[in-house]
Image (cartoon, grey):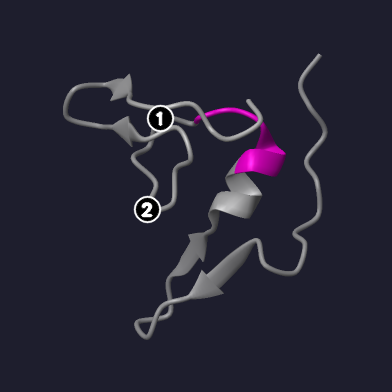
Amino acid sequence: MAAKPQPLQPGDFYLTPEGYMVFTEQYHLRRGSCCKSGCRHCPWGFDPVTQKATRRPAGG
């Protein structure tokens, strides 16, 4: 069974000057897993070039 989507919380994202939504480390940690998209604030340090995560998030 797929996880139920959770509503966004304060601090989960910010908007860039260009208007893009950027998810924060807080959001990714609450999400609980790496989506392997090379996100700017990935707590797992996923590198889309090598396809590898380079670290473990604190508490994980």
52 vs 1, nearest the viewer: 52
Count of all numbered marks drawn on residues in the image? 2
Residue 5 in the figure: left or right of residue 21: right
Q: Quadrant of the N terminus?
A: top right
**Where's residue 22, x and y in %?**
47, 63
Q: Quadrant of the C terminus?
A: top right
Q: Residue at x 58, y 65 (%)?
A: 13
Q: Residue at x 48, y 40 (%)?
A: 43
Gap in angstroms between the C-alphas marked 2 and 1 = 11 Å
Looking at the rendered structure, the kind of residue marked 1 is Lys
- Most extreme residue toward the left is 49
**Residue 21 image offset from top left, x and y in percent:** 49, 67
In this figure, which residue is indicated by the disc labeled 1? 36
Measured along the vertical axis of the image, is residue 16 above or below residue 9? below
- Residue type indicated by callout 2: Arg
Segment tinted magenta in the rendering = 29-34
